[in-house]
Amino acid sequence: MNVLGLHFGHDAGVVVLRDGRVASFVLRERFNRVKHACSVDVGHIDYALADAGIGIDDLDCCAIVSTQNYELLIDDRLAVSLSPQAHPDDPVRSPLRDLFHTQGIDINERLVGSVLNYIYDDTRASSIHRDLFPEYRTRNRADIRLSGYLMDYVHSELWNGRPTLNDISATNFLPLLDDDTVRLGMHYPFTLTLRGRAMPAYMVQHHTAHASSVYYLSEFDHAAILTHDGAISPYGHNNGMFFWGEGQQLTPLSPHHLVVGALYSRVGERLGWDLHSAAGKLMGLAPYGKPRFFEQRFVGNAFDLATRGIDDMYATWWAHCIDRARALRYDLEPLGDTKRVMAPIAVDIAASTQTLMEEVMRMATATLRQILVTAGLPADRLCYSGGTALNCPTNSRMFRESGFEAMFVEPCCDDSGLALGAALYVCHNLYEQPLPPRRVPGAAVTPYFGPRYDEASIECALREFASAIVIERIADPAAAAAQDLAQNRILGWFEGRSELGPRALGHRSLLVDPRISENWARVNRVKGREHWRPFAPSVLEEEAAKWFAGCPFPSSYMLFTAAVTTSALPAITHVDGSSRIQTVTPECGMFYRVLFEFNRLTGVPVILNTSFNGPAEPIVESPQHALRFLVESDLDVLYLDGIRVTRVI
């Protein structure tokens, strides 16, 4: 079965599944070079199909998803159209379509989206949204809107009322597992026409796509699933849900009504960063401070907070932090100035907000575990996805304190994984295709699904930059790279297909020796980043427990924070003694051998590994991107699929 997955919101992408396996994965931002870019480019659909080795006529259906309140924007309305009617060959039952029909609801009135207003309406224009779709300067608004996005899906009576987390934990959701109305109710059938070929299509609820992405990649045959992100709605299923996955079936259990994800990003904005970078920078800043403003009364979901008189968590939290800071005689003037973000007021607000995030998610995880106990379901495996799952310290606390024996977070847990999640949901939950053979439960899924670049493509790129580079074709690139690292050179490492998600995992990475403390500042200068931002290590999986502790092993995607148990790695050790690690196995390709050879030379199986990109730009994707970075930066050497490249001196 061949499924096309399309995600139209920020971090937009295209995926092709073949029999439940990823055959191609294209992130829009990697090609138009705009971080978190939204909308779908028809050329990327063509590219993904060609990379997967199939044509349009080979597709069985299409899965469609978007970020909350993002319309479906397409660059070529002549090539793609979408109709809110089921295709004649659609075999899937749709409880939501039946419900809308019974209640006389017009689906067209439920398709929403406000992003175009923030792009094209000068009176409401948002620079953030315009940055995500710079093509607006040359495109007419009427020519790019394919459809609105559906935000309302099937609702269970068990979700009525104003339930606190304790109320949710005491509810028996087991009846939902015996009723396909909810399990099949998180989609609506459409017909997509792509270059004249009409096919069944399914619009999928945002957090159902997150849940599908993490569960179906987990290698678990059953799991509890929690999703959460920065959506601003305080109630309902549009900022996250609890799910249960078993076999190929995925069932929503309950909305959780958490609001801490949106609060976290908005606090980062108040410290001076843009919305899409705020959460990651706030996480990196927090260890410099102390959680002096944290209070337990802010822990819970929106209804917990309402019982305490807190109706707007963000506004109340920010006011609380400022009031406490004034009482403690902090200097408030640095707030909002990113050049002064290391001031005590900023780092202590960051630390307090990080503690709040951890405590809320710890409580949510305990709630989910109690739901399983109440329903008599196994409470041993946890999956976690959504934008908040990029918060590594929180993930590690959830793992250590949740009571679950195993925990999995997928590498594309942010919105970059939505196209994949929606496609997996359609393949397995709607079409009930069997899962591919399971490996070891929770084992790392190889994340390298980006486009292929053959030898001819690489040679073409080398010719393009021939006047500015020196090329060496060497017999053992991994050994040579390890030698360069041991001689304290900063490497760009480009290998094979790029990795899923926002974190470099050894195929589009900058590498350097972690034993030299000055390399922290040195790599930040090369990348054009703030001097205080930390770096992560890659470590041979078989050696990881000798150097790190306090996180699950394997930790394959830099999504868990570990304690560094040695003083020998200053360039990757944060001020609190932590580091978010990537454990590396032979499945990671030649990158594994670089680590192996570096360990042979130095006795250290660890390398500093950070994303291969400059300031405010996406990770490099193509050979041309990597070569351009080399010639325009202070990078010492680039390994381009095993070819050693340096600049002309």
Image (cartoon, rainbow, N blue to C red):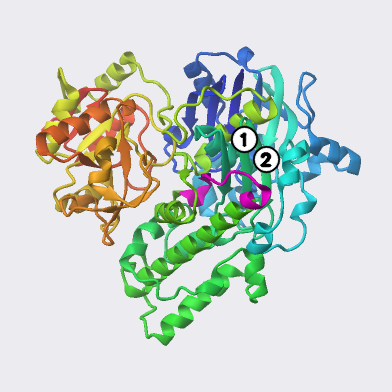
* Circle 1/circle 2 CB separation < 8 Å: yes
Q: Identity of the amino acid at label 2?
A: Thr
Visible residue check, residue 439: yes
Residue on which disc 1 sits: 246
State which quarter of the image contains the N terminus. top right
Q: Residues under labels 1 and 2: Cα distance?
A: 9 Å
Q: Residue at x 31, y 68 (%)?
A: 342
Q: Residue at x 55, y 37 (%)?
A: 215
Q: Is residue 432 left or right of residue 395?
A: right
Question: How far from the left and from the top, in percent, is residue 298?
Answer: 55, 71
Q: Quadrant of residue 233?
A: bottom right
Q: Which residues are magenta?
A: 372-389
Q: Identity of the amino acid at label 1?
A: Glu
Question: How far from the left and from the top, in percent, is residue 58?
Answer: 61, 13
Visible residue check, residue 153: no
Quick check: 488 above or below 270?
A: above
Residue on which disc 2 sits: 251
